[in-house]
Amino acid sequence: MKALEVKGISKSYPGVRALDRIEFSCSRGSVHALVGENGAGKSTLIKILSGATAPDEGELLLDGKSYSPASPSEAATVGVSTIYQEFNLIPGLSVAENIFLGRERISRGLLDAASMRSEAKALLARIGAPIDVRRRVGTLSVAEQQLVEIAKALAVSARVLIMDEPSATLSDREMTLLYNVVRTLSRDGVTILYVSHRMDEIFDLCDTCTIMKDGRSVCTRRVADLDRASLIRLMVGREVDTRFPDRRDNGDEPAAQIVLDVKALRLAERVKDVTFSIRAGEIVGLAGLVGAGRTEVARAIFGLDDIASGEISLRGRAYRPKTPAEAIESGVALVPEDRKAQGLVLGLSIRENAMLPTLKSICRFGFVSRRREQSRVASVCRQLAVSASSAEVPVGTLSGGNQQKVVFGKWIAHDYTLLILDEPTRGVDVGAKVEFYRLIDEIARSGKAVLLISSEMPELLGMADRIVALRDGVVTGEASAHGATEESVLQMIAR
């Protein structure tokens, strides 16, 4: 039986046809992938299915009956729950309080905390999550918070669970737990609509797949009938021959100048002893599990976190920035791991975001030169192929891939020597990833030094010249990426 049917759903915004007659269905208990490039319309469709916005035309059916939720709470009431990339949890409340928020158990006019704890414990046990229901959510890991979100959905007897990029911030071990939970829910008859850019997840976990492109549903297929190449071709509309640029040798030249030299770096938290260097034109990858201290190293180099001890030199000179402004002035640029919270001002336009680091360079007598600003922004949008009707569009309305292009674009007009990339392709579709890989390669070819942090091992192996492994804030090994394998890097991490 069809658990969910989407029939001719369309949605338009001023100047944009976001969805154009979308059609597909999901069987009860199936794991159905929803895939497509950034800007394909997946987020708009999720908002419609979850009751956050209404379609202009078309029909939704839930277990064969008409379904038109006026709000997310109404959708949850009839059994459709959504887990977004940004969790809808309150850090200061306990696990049990979050699970039953808005649906609290009441006994004789009073809050029945014992009943909520008991039910919350049972819900978490159902998905194999041994989390203390009295813990504050703010103390949980990302993976644990995700399990709390799933338990919230089960608390309202979800029949359809929409998961939007559920693995974006998870480690390999946490991914295994997520897989087990999804399979358990599927066996219990819950239909999972699984949105992901990661090819491995789709082939490992999903039964069927709907491919979207430019607001349309291209086709729906059994995953068993697809291979990686055919799925990518359907998503992007062209052949993608290789994910990574050809190997470069310029970073291996001993004569190349050392741009960044880090010795015995220690921070107040996580980072205990980190030593490495990066030469001009070289890409150095930082490998490690979640919590190894990679992001903290990047933050310290960019002046966001205080350095407890150790030495850093930049182009042969002592370097210890106290603020990001000092780091930028010294020629250091950062693409942070969370573009929405740290890399962009979502309410500002593409133009305003793109010029934030370089405003001073286009000012005369305290006034911004609009001509120079417009010229630079137009160049950035053209060079990175940012898809938007104009540079005045609020950046918060763009797809994830286009938002990430703006984050990169902020630094194109800036004179930097070191570019730090923290999870640069997280939440980005396969077509856009290829574009970013080529851009990173071009940046390194131009003589810039690049520090690459990524949880995707193939990305590190494919892009880096050298790999430095971290575990619990300590460097455990260093090796050339040429000839390295996932197993050899994991062995370095485990030392």
Image (spheres, grey):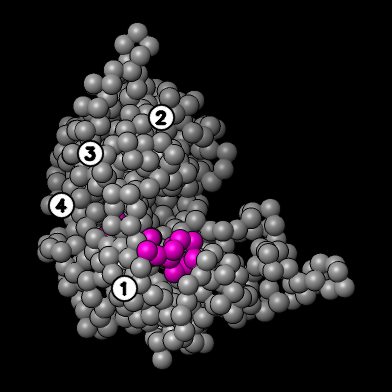
The magenta stretch is: 37-56
Amino acid type of the residue tagged 4 in the rendering: Pro
Q: Residue most toward the right?
A: 108
Disc 3, disc 4: CB below 8 Å? no
Answer above or below: position of 415 versus 29.
Answer: above
Q: Is residue 206 above or below residue 137?
A: below
Alpha carbon separation for disc pair 3 and 4? 22 Å
State the residue at coordinates (15%, 64%): 237
Q: Nearer the viewer, mark 4 or mark 2?
A: 4
Tell me how far mark 2 sits from mark 1, CA to CA. 58 Å
Per the image, label 4 sits on a secondary structure element best described as: loop
Report the disc number at residue 409. Answer: none
**Inter-mark Cα distance, 2 to 3:** 34 Å
Mark 1 or 4, which is nearer the eye?
1
| Numbered label attached to residue 8 | 1
Sooner in the amino-acid sequence: mark 2 or mark 1? 1
Residue indicated by mark 4: 245
Depth check, front residue: 94 or 487? 94
Q: Is residue 10 visible?
A: yes
Q: In x, y percent, where is residue 327?
A: 40, 27
Q: Position of residue 147 (x, y in %)?
A: 56, 69
Q: Quadrant of residue 492?
A: bottom left
- Binning the other alpha carbons within 10 Å of mark 4 as few (below 14), some (14 to 19) or many (20 upward) gives some
Q: Marks 1 and 4: CB-CB under 8 Å?
A: no
- Please name the residue that numbered disc 2 is placed on: 312
Q: Is 219 placed left or right of 75 in the picture?
A: left
Residue identified by numbered label 3: 381
